[in-house]
Image (cartoon, grey):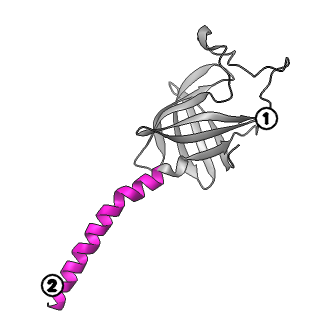
Amino acid sequence: MSHKLAATLGGLALAALAAGLAPAAKAAAADAIVGTWMTPEQDSKITIEPCGSAYCGHISWLKNPLDDKGNPKVDINNKKEELQSRPILGMQMISELKPNADGGWEDGKIYNPRDGGTYASKAALEGDVLKVKGCILFLCKSQDWTRTTAP
């Protein structure tokens, strides 16, 4: 086999290998959001996991999980009365967050138990800091969540 043919075949094999690894690399980058995150107030941890083709997050730890009467804290600020008795600990608060071409996540929804509102959400990862943004129309609020250990 000539050196030219060997180089061409080697180049084709390398290109095929790279093409095969590209989806795996993209999935690994998308999975970078997976893990447990401490909120800025350091009073709760959110665990994010894949759910279908998107990512979801639930409240996995509360610094103060009980109310003044010793009962588990519930979602008293929820706008839907039928959900006001559900426990906050374990509650899903992020849904439908999808990877985007910029290496972040978008088109999600985030629920804020402090005000009972659900907002459009996106996120971007900078090192061990997840920059989470919740928006309603053009008004947005951002928070920096830090990677932490699972509860």
Q: Residue at x 63, y 45 (%)?
A: 36
Camera-side residue: 63 or 101? 63
- Helix, strand or loop at label 2? It is helix
- Helix, strand or loop at label 1? It is loop
Q: Residue at x 62, y 27 (%)?
A: 91
Residue where numbered disc 1 is placed: 63
Q: Position of residue 28 (x, y in %)?
A: 46, 55
Residue where numbered disc 2 is placed: 5
Reply above or below: 19 against 135.
below
Residue 20 placement, left or right of 32: left
Residue range of the region highlighted in magenta in the rendering: 2-30
- For label 2, the crowd category at 10 Å Cα-Cα, with few meaning under 14, some 14 to 19 and many 20 or more, is few
Q: Position of residue 122 (x, y in %)?
A: 51, 38
> How many numbered marks appear?
2
Instruction: Say what amino acid the circle numbered 2 marks.
Output: Leu
Q: Label 1 to label 2, Cα distance in Å? A: 65 Å
